[in-house]
Image (tube, helix red, strand yellow):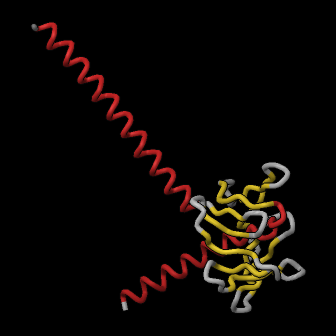
């Protein structure tokens, strides 16, 4: 009888171990997916800008103007590579190789070829923050501009809630 109880306890402990290990991995994986989808943006070969989950964030239109998902203009790039915001202000410089420099001349983004069609968008520390089609290398700054717009909207909401 005593040996039967030990066998049952061993099996229960083993099952409990498997259950807790599996749950820990599932929670960790879902946390990573949320973080990745919140941080990465993709620009496809048609100029559509989405997050990892496929949610439409914006697009590059036929006139080379970048718009958010509501169709509002974010910026355009003139023939000299100047990134001009919707308000007419110069936001920085977008090089044809995919490097983007802010108005102070600081390098904000770079691109790195992944294959013959795709490029990774890298922050100054080399972290991959998105993937773009090679035809839109110069629009790597769309990712930067998108996050700036999101930060601005968040601040406006917070200020509105306070006041």
Residue in view at x 75 percent, y 75 percent: 60
Residue 16, percent from left and from top: 27, 29
Q: Is residue 57 placed above or below 8 in the rendered structure?
A: below
Residue 114, percent from left and from top: 78, 49
All told, the count of numbered labels is: 0
Residue 138, percent from left and from top: 81, 69
Q: Nearer the viewer, residue 39 or 71?
A: 71
Whether residue 125 sits left or right of residue 99 in the image: it is left
Residue in view at x 66 percent, y 70 percent: 144
Q: Nearer the viewer, residue 45 or 109?
A: 45
Q: Is residue 118 placed above or below 97 in the rendered structure?
A: above
Q: Nearer the viewer, residue 101 or 135?
A: 135
Whether residue 81 sits left or right of residue 25 in the image: it is right
Residue 53 figure quarter: bottom right
Residue in view at x 66 percent, y 55 percent: 128
Q: Residue furthest left?
A: 1
Residue 49 figure quarter: bottom right
In the picture, which quadrant includes the N terminus? top left
Residue 27, percent from left and from top: 40, 46
Whether residue 106 sits left or right of residue 35 in the image: it is right
Residue 14 figure quarter: top left
């Amino acid at each position: 009888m005593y040996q039967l109880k030990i066998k049952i306890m061993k099996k229960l402990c083993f099952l409990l171990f498997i259950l807790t290990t599996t749950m820990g991995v599932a929670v960790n994986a879902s946390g990573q997916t949320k973080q990745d989808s919140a941080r990465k943006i993709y620009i496809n070969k048609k100029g559509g800008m989405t997050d990892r989950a496929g949610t439409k964030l914006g697009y590059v239109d036929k006139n080379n103007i970048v718009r958010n998902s509501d169709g509002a203009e974010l910026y355009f790039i003139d023939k000299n590579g100047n990134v001009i915001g919707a308000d007419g202000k110069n936001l920085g410089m977008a090089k044809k190789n995919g490097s983007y420099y802010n108005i102070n001349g600081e390098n904000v983004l770079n691109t790195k070829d992944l294959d013959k069609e795709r490029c990774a968008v890298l922050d100054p520390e080399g972290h991959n923050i998105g993937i773009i089609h090679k035809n839109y290398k110069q629009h790597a700054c769309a990712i930067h501009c998108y996050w700036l717009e999101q930060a601005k909207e968040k601040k406006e909401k917070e200020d509105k809630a306070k006041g």
